Image (cartoon, grey):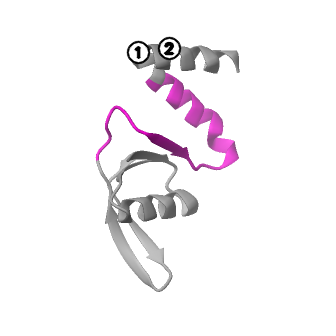
Amino acid sequence: MKVLIIGPGGVGGYLAYKLKKCSNYVSVIGSRGSVKKLKIKDVDKTQEVEFDPLIEKYDVVFVTVKSYHLNEVIETIQKIFKKCNCSTCFKRNRAFRKI
């Protein structure tokens, strides 16, 4: 499964770590762009995890940011959808405009 996680804080970072550990394709975006590595503290040990590069399509996108950052994230997602011309993204883009 191809997974994108936006916001690698406590929840997003741990979720990314567990999904990567289960052999999924996991990409992570933080406030400074794409995240290549994270140090994760799991129960009794600290591990460094490498994530996959960004691609164009994902099966699942998790947004794990604080509520006061949601507007910025929604604007970023809208820009991504506007670049795509497929009918699915076009319909989603119209739905975003109604919000």
| SS for callout 1 | loop
Q: How far is disc 2 from disc 1 in space, using C-alphas? A: 6 Å
Residue drawn at x 56%, y 20% is 92
On whether residue 74 falls in the magenta region, the answer is yes
| Residue 32 appears anywhere in the view | no
| SS for callout 2 | helix
Task: Decide: few, some or many residues near mark 2? Use Cα within 10 Å; few <14, some 14-19, many ≥20.
Answer: some
Residue drawn at x 53%, y 46% is 62
Q: What percent of the width, then of the height, locates residue 13? A: 48, 60
Q: Nearer the viewer, residue 37 or 1?
A: 1
Q: What percent of the width, then of the height, locates residue 34? A: 37, 46
- What mark, if any, has residue 67 been given in the picture? none
The extreme bottom residue here reads 44
Q: Which residues are magenta?
A: 53-80
Circle 2: residue type: Phe
On whether residue 72 falls in the magenta region, the answer is yes
Q: Compared with residue 41, is residue 71 higher up or lower down, i.e. above or below?
A: above
Q: Compared with residue 3, is residue 71 higher up or lower down, i.e. above or below?
A: above
Residue drawn at x 43%, y 39% is 59
Q: Compared with residue 92, is residue 50 higher up or lower down, i.e. above or below?
A: below
**Which quadrant holds the C terminus?**
top right
Task: Decide: few, some or many residues near mark 1? Use Cα within 10 Å; few <14, some 14-19, many ≥20.
Answer: few
Q: What percent of the width, then of the height, locates residue 67? A: 69, 45
Q: Which residue is mark 2?
A: 90
- How many badges with numbers are in the image? 2
Circle 1: residue type: Cys
Q: What percent of the width, then of the height, locates residue 33? A: 40, 43
Q: Which residue is mark 1?
A: 86
| Residue 99 appears anywhere in the view | yes
